[in-house]
Image (spheres, rainbow, N blue to C red):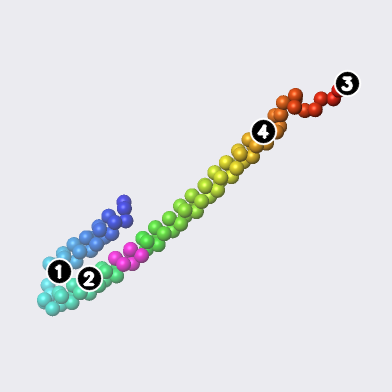
Amino acid sequence: MSTGKFLAGFIVGGVVGAIAGLLLAPQSGEETREMIARNSEEMKNKAEKTVKEIQGKAEDIVSDMQKKGDDIMEKIQTMINSKKEEKAEAPAAEAPASETPATEA
């Protein structure tokens, strides 16, 4: 589930719950307005807290993935360098016998 969908569901659920509470509460208009203001402030604070938590987790995940990617790139580069060295050493080891100086008898 994406973060955007989660947050949208979280906010919509809070709004629906607040509306249901208002419709079912036997309070005066002034008390209802105070309750709406208080609940909306609480919902705003909860939403901000949730967003910060999700951002922190997302940053941790991105950091971990970046580190793993760097590790993989380093291993790949090491393998490439190793293969290059092997190829560079191979022709010297496989030099034909005719190129070696012959001793005359």
Q: Nearer the viewer, residue 57 or 16?
A: 57
- Specify which label sits upstream in the sequence, 1 or 2: 1
Residue at numbered disc 1: 22
Span highlighted in magenta in the image: 47-52
Query: Taking 50 as reference, is 18 left or right?
Result: left
Gap between marks 3 and 1, in whole Å? Answer: 113 Å
Q: Give the residue type at disc 1.
A: Leu
Secondary-structure class at tag 4? helix
Q: Secondary structure at mark 3?
A: loop
Q: Which residue is mark 3?
A: 105
Distance, label 2 to label 4, CA atoms, is 74 Å
Disc 4 or 1, which lies upstream in sequence?
Answer: 1
Q: Secondary structure at mark 1?
A: helix
Given the current orientation, which residue lies at the most extreme right position? 105
Chief SS of the magenta region: helix
Q: Which residue is mark 4?
A: 90
- Which residue is tagged 2? 40
